Amino acid sequence: KTSSTMAKLSTAIVSLALLLNGVSALVPSNVPKTKRPAFDATRAATNTMAAASIASALVIGPMADAVDMAIDTPSFGSSSLVAERVTREGLYREYDVDLGDQEFDDARSTYKSAKETKSKKGKYTALIAVLVVGSFIIPMAQYFWYVKDDDSSDKFFNKVPEPEPEPPKKKGWF
């Protein structure tokens, strides 16, 4: 349990560090930049924390897994069930099979009936349609929200055509 807790904790710390570093892909590019200080304490702290959590996960993780494997060894006490061992003939050789109670495979049908599936089809179709349309509309709206004050496209499309340069004069005898 400690290894999974440590793994979850280190994953959360790394995710938080990456999130706090900041993402500026969708910020308009014409924002005037301020002069950065020579040493950024916030960035140094987040990078140090991310490196420490990755190092601790790499060092402690395999040791914790080894401890878990040592703890999970089965004990063959009087309460252990022993399956019947049968030798069967295969295509290439004989092999031993343990016959016991079936624990994992359940052959019952757990599907909904065709009538119930057909009656709820419209609801799920509408849900999928809303999700698909939303996956296209929401990013477009977000993009246009970010660039609504940007005038670079206006400058590009309303550009005054440059006059054609005069052709060079021909050199002749005169």
Image (cartoon, rainbow, N blue to C red):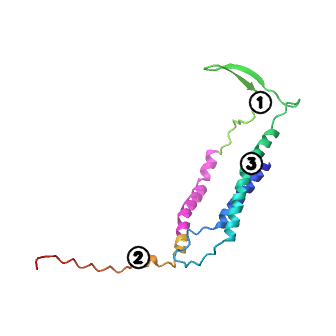
Q: Is residue 63 above or below residue 30?
A: above
Of residues 107 and 94, which is closer to you in this image? 94
Q: Position of residue 53 (x, y in %)?
A: 72, 57
Does dot 2 land on a helix, a strand or a loop?
Answer: helix
Q: Residue furthest front?
A: 173
Residue 16 seen by the camera? no
Q: Give the quadrant of the C terminus.
A: bottom left
Q: CA distance from mark 1 to mark 2?
A: 75 Å
Q: Label 2 vs label 3: CA separation? A: 55 Å
Q: Dot 3, how many residues are within 10 Å of its Cα: few (below 14), some (14-19), or many (20+)? A: some
For residue 78, the mark is none
What is the magenta range?
A: 113-140
State if disc 1 and disc 3 touch (CB < 8 Å): no
Residue type beneath disc 3: Gly
Q: Residue 159 location in percent, x, y? A: 37, 79
Residue carrying label 3:
61
Report the Cα–Cα distance between label 3 and label 1: 35 Å
Mark identifier at residue 101 = 1
Residue 39 in the image: above or below residue 109: below
Mark 1: amino acid = Asp
Taking 171 as reference, is 16 left or right?
Answer: right
Looking at the picture, which amino acid does disc 2 mark?
Phe
Relative horizontal placement of residue 29, taking residue 157 as reference (left or right)? right
Q: Tell me if residue 156 can be seen.
A: yes
User: Given this view, does label 1 or label 2 mark the residue nearer the observer?
Assistant: 2
Residue tagged 2? 156
> Which x, y percent locates residue 66?
77, 42
Instruction: Kindly identify the residue that appears in the image at 63 percent across and 68 percent down.
Output: 22
Quarter-of-image position of residue 127: bottom right
- The residue nearer to you, when weighing 139 against 62, is 62
